Image (cartoon, coloured by chain):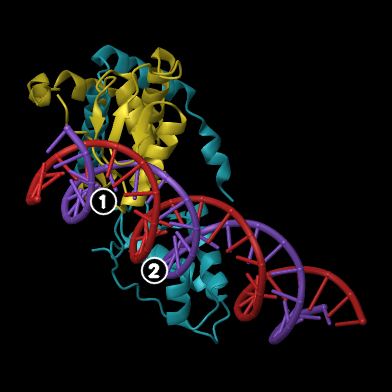
Chain colours: A yellow, B cyan, C purple, D red
Amino acid sequence: MTNKRLTIQIDFRSDLPIYTQIVNQVQAQVASGILKPGDQLPTVRALAEELRVNFNTVARAYRILDEERIISTQQGRGTYITEIPPPKVSEKFRREALEELTQRYIGEAMRLEFSKSEIKQMVSDQIKAWKESDESANG
Amino acid sequence: MTNKRLTIQIDFRSDLPIYTQIVNQVQAQVASGILKPGDQLPTVRALAEELRVNFNTVARAYRILDEERIISTQQGRGTYITEIPPPKVSEKFRREALEELTQRYIGEAMRLEFSKSEIKQMVSDQIKAWKESDESANG
DNA sequence: TGTATTATTGTACTAATTGTATCATTGTGT
DNA sequence: ACACAATGATACAATTAGTACAATAATACA
């Protein structure tokens, strides 16, 4: 369990800077329990290579997360999820993460000139058709 | 596909201001599909040098296109064509775009361990709360 | 066991690239 | 001369990349 694969998806066209996207997604995964206390995150260089960004960009994200006490970075050792997640990482925050994700989705759908009812219908349909068997990536 | 060469022809004797000519030609190339969503435009300085104009003139054109939601500019990163498809694209293509967008959204939400009902509820709530104030940005 | 060496990891500082904001200059029409 | 719009010049801010460094761990070797 030392090294679980951190799944981060970067949208290089997003309005959000890359380092913000990393922060948000780590926050969300900690909040939702995907990342648990003690889990080691990839090294700044490893994650940077995977995301094809400069390792300083990852380091910046890690520094922000460190300041928020969500992770603990130690020079020469690595980066870990803190043992006592701050109250910020809570159900409230978990909900905020989904809100942000949802707003981004709706915004993009709206720009595609879909109506509200069309969007809701599509979400409903796609959720119904969603295959949970894809969750085999869980460890 | 990072940098396709943007062909803009400026007529310095035209009645139209340079920035208007840039706006018009980008609009036309987006409408005709020459420029596609996600394409990165030249930097304000690069295009300015190519056209032998001041980069603020290009920046002005980009700002207008940004306000029209045709492009998205991000300080420190660059300028991209937004995900608005040209109106002439078929309904089928439009629907496929929404499907893909929706699946990606649901996938991310599921990865954060939100339940199907939570997701549907959130979409419903956020759509209800969605601000139409975007429409007031028309000028 | 102890110590030197090397590798790995995060940090700090700086540079480069990008768009933004503000004001000055130029040109045109009245 | 004046008013206004278009363009240019300059300084700024945000993001990302480059380079060198420091702390820790792992290894080699006496």
In depth, the one of D23 and A1 nearer the eye is: D23
Q: Is residue A114 visible?
A: no
Image coordinates for residue A38, horizontal then vertical, percent? 27, 22
- Pointer 1 local density, CA inside 10 Å: few below 14, some 14–19, many at least 20: few
Taking the spot 40% from the left edge, 15% from the top edge, the residue there is A90
- Image quadrant where residue A36 sits: top left
Mark 2, secondary structure of its residue:
loop
Amino acid at the residue labelled 1: Val
Left or right placement of residue A48 versus residue B10 in this view: left
- Pointer 2 local density, CA inside 10 Å: few below 14, some 14–19, many at least 20: some
- Image quadrant where residue C11 sits: top left
Quadrant including the N terminus of chain B: bottom left
Taking the spot 34% from the left edge, 45% from the top edge, the residue there is A58
The dot on residue B89 is 1
Left or right placement of residue A18 versus residue B53 in this view: left
| Mark 2 vs mark 1, CA separation in Å | 25 Å
Number of marks in picture: 2
Amino acid at the residue labelled 2: Pro
Image coordinates for residue A72, horizontal then vertical, percent? 36, 30
Image coordinates for residue B37, horizontal then vertical, percent? 31, 54
Image coordinates for residue B38, horizontal then vertical, percent? 31, 54
